[in-house]
Image (tube, helix red, strand yellow):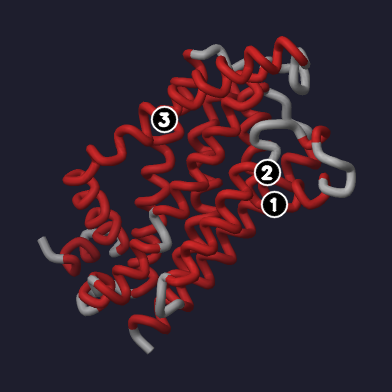
Amino acid sequence: MSVSDDVGLGWPRWRRSWWYHATYYAQTWRGSVASTVLFPIFYLVALGVGVGHLVAKHHGLVDGQTYLHFIAPSLLATTTMQLGESESLWPVLAAVKWVRSYHAAVASPLEPRDILVGKLSWVTTRAFGTGVVYTIVIAAFGGLQSWWGLTLPLIGVLITLAFAAPFVAYAAAVQSDASFVAIYRFAIIPMFLFSATFYPVSAYPGYLRPLVQFVPLYHGVALARSAAFGHWPLLATVGHLTVLGSMSVVGFLWGRWSLQRRLVD
């Protein structure tokens, strides 16, 4: 069945783009098993149990939680952020410059917008699967204190989309991957370490707290903790959702423009 046949039956064209990524992943999924299944267990054992023992011995609870329970939701947030980055920088630049698979796709009835929607849909599909695994592991370690914890995979999807959309747009616009390493070193790693991931905002000096709360990943970490603990302060939750949602929308609009310019104009 051709793409045009799919469209005639009411199927959206972006589904073909999604299916391309899913088919490719079906042949390469073994390489991501460790990062998807084993890493959450290793992280929680090493940090939550190992470091958590030292924290409990010298400081007691962290924001009213054991250290394991405190960091467990944040590890889901950091993992889904890194998934959005890893699936969106080099893979997209390769598709528009080196392998040129996006050029082949746009020669079919697919349009740049279909390619973008299919790509982001696939990345969020992976994020949802990763979020489900993390949620199960967190629950197994006793880190869920509310039924709201079942929303953790959806929060992971939002975090991934908030980072993947602008990264896809950026990768589609540049001519070289020279800046990608700098993005990883000076943006991704600092966010991983300093977004209230491993210690609360109150542990930072007063002048740094507004900066930490400005960092995009902080909003994902805060939402993940709210879901795990079942505590949803209204104004803060609206703020977190607004930041991540705005990043997703702006990234999508930018990505539609950059892919159109790169592939058609």
- Judge from the rendering whether residue 58 lies leftward or rightward of residue 25; answer left or right: right
* Quadrant into which the C terminus falls: bottom left
Is residue 141 depicted above or below 75 in this figure?
Answer: above
Residue 154 seen anywhere in this rendered image of the structure: yes
Circle 3 Cα neighbour tier, 10 Å, few/some/many (<14 / 14–19 / ≥20): some
Return the residue nearer the eye: 15 or 218. 218
Mark 2 residue crowding within 10 angstroms, few (<14) / some (14–19) / many (20+): some
**Disc sitting over residue 215 in the figure:** 1
Contact? badges 1 and 2 (CB < 8 Å) = yes
Q: Are marks 3 and 1 in contact (CB under 8 Å)?
A: no
Horizontal and vertical percent position of residue 214? 75, 52
**Among numbered discs 1 and 2, the one appearing first in the sequence:** 2
What residue did someone put label 3 on? 39
Q: Amino acid at mark 1?
A: Val
Confirm or deny contact between disc 2 and disc 3 (CB under 8 A): no
Q: Secondary structure at mark 3?
A: helix
Q: Is residue 253 above or below residue 64?
A: below
Q: Nearer the viewer, mark 3 or mark 1?
A: 3
Identified at 56% across, 15% down, the residue is 49
Distance in Å between CA atoms under marks 1 and 2: 9 Å
Which tag, 3 or 1, sits closer to the chain's start? 3
Question: Residue at left 32%, top 74%?
Answer: 96
Q: Position of residue 171 (x, y in %)?
A: 44, 69
Query: Is residue 146 among the parts visible in the rendering?
Result: no
- For label 2, the residue is 194
Res 114 label: none
